[in-house]
Amino acid sequence: MTVDWDAFTPVASLAGGALIGLSAALFVLLNGRIAGISGVLGGLLRPVRGDLGWRVAFIVGIVIAPWVYVLFTALPMPRIDAGWAVLVLAGLLVGVGTRYGSGCTSGHGVCGLSRLSPRSLVATLTFMGAGFVTVFVLRHVVVA
């Protein structure tokens, strides 16, 4: 195993994680809402009166954030080793998993664990474990 030292960014990663945690904490403290994207986006599909503004602002912020970031530095070039069909299928599977799991990775992993939610602990262990197994199988069983 080798380390791609150009992609090894512990300081930036730690800062990003701290900002995500701070943002999620402030969001729940100031708004009483969980910053899980599936719940925020799902609430737009069945809007409740008086609940639409903050949800739209949240989504707009997620879309605009990379444009603000690029004012200070270049965006990294993503490398995706999959075709459109695989990406669409993966997106659908994530959506189904989010529905069955009653939330997404950010909702459970960041917000749920910080609230000591047992359901979020089980969900986070499940999706992390499934990810570990998938990477192992794809890299050491299927490709080998």
Image (tube, rainbow, N blue to C red):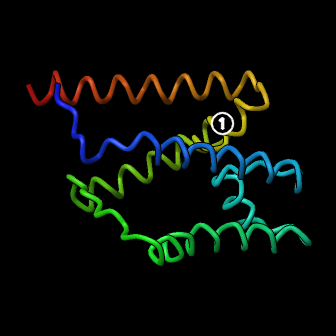
Q: Is residue 82 left or right of residue 63?
A: left
Residue at 50%, 77% in the rendered image: 67
x and y, in percent, of residue 111 in the image: 71, 39
Quadrant of the drawing holding the C terminus: top left
Quarter in which the N terminus is drawn: top left
Q: Is residue 46 left or right of residue 77?
A: right
- Asked where in the image residue 47 lies, by quadrant, the reply is bottom right
Residue at 53 percent of width and 24 percent of height? 126
Label 1: few (<14), some or many (≥20) within 10 Å?
Answer: many
Residue at disc 1, secondary structure: helix
Foreground pick, 94 / 72:
72
Residue drawn at (68%, 49%) of the image = 36
Where 65 falls versus 101 (above or below)? Answer: below
Q: In this view, does 86 lie to the left or right of 69?
A: left
Tag count in the figure?
Answer: 1
Left or right side of 45 for 82: left
Location of mark 1 (residue): 108
Q: Which amino acid does label 1 sit on?
A: His
Rendered view: 54 above or below 127: below
Query: Image point 75% across, 61% down: which residue?
Result: 43
